[in-house]
Image: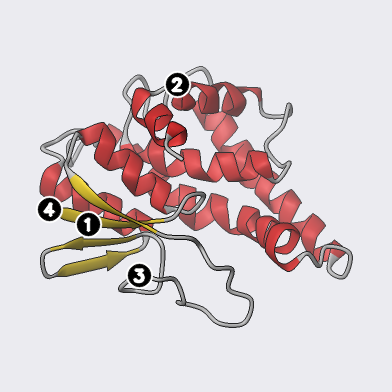
Amino acid sequence: MLKLYYAPLTRAVRVRWLLDELGIPYELERGTFEPTTDRFFIQDTPTGKYPTLVDGDIVLCESGAIVEYVLERYGEGRLAPAPGTAERAAYLQWLHYAEGTAFPPVGIVVWITRYRQSGDAVAELLEDARERARATLSFVEEALGDQPYLVGRDFTAADIMMCFTLVAAQAAGILDDRFPQLLAYTKRLASRPALQKLVADP
């Protein structure tokens, strides 16, 4: 059975949500995220990071890599368009955009304001990160338009990846009324039973 090392409010949420959407049984190893001010890879997992997934002899970190691995091995074609299709191209773009482009500036804002609490000392950096975050979100806002999901009418794992980024942006005060499509999209994702079940679990 798969074993997921999980801490709330970390990217492990993505993996747990995915597993629940797919109905894949797994063992949940709960932990608490330890802020890393001067040392890294210190979480109580086999890799020192959240999330970490163990599947037999395979040990993986990085939420995007875990999502792709789970879908390839256990997805049976669900939550990902078929290879070679136009939808697959869009899916891959958003799957990686969520973490590779959209999250980094959001992460800077969250890190400075929540963990380092040094916003006044680096006010210029903080405002630059906010502006870059808004630019990355504007790109998603425009592309989403009136589609229900990133790839069109079908919910995919790219939406799972993006939702964590958007919720973090909302908590940091970046995702606001300037992004009506993304706010509606985030509410749509929050209504999914698998995510509601996760949120309701203390």
Q: Residues within 10 Å of mark 2 (few under 14, many from 20)?
A: few
What residue sits 47% from the left and 50% below the top?
8
Q: What residue does disc 3 label?
A: 45
First of labels 3, 1 by sequence position: 1
**Tag 1–tag 4 contact (CB < 8 Å):** yes
Q: Position of residue 90 (x, y in %)?
A: 36, 38
- Circle 4: residue type: Met
**Residue ranking furthest to the bottom:** 39
107 in relation to 42, above or below: above
Q: Is residue 86 visible?
A: no
Q: CA distance from mark 4 to mark 3?
A: 17 Å
Task: Point out the frontmost of discs 2 and 3.
Answer: 3
First of labels 2, 3 by sequence position: 3
Q: CA distance from mark 1 to mark 4?
A: 6 Å
First of labels 2, 1 by sequence position: 1
Q: Residues within 10 Å of mark 1 (few under 14, many from 20)?
A: some
First of labels 4, 2 by sequence position: 4
- Circle 3: residue type: Thr
12 in relation to 199, above or below: below
Q: CA distance from mark 4 to mark 2?
A: 28 Å
**What number is the disc on residue 3?**
1
Task: Point out the frontmost of discs 4 and 2.
Answer: 4
**What number is the disc on residue 191?**
2
- Circle 2: residue type: Ser
What residue sits 57% from the left and 21% below the top?
184
**What number is the disc on residue 1?**
4
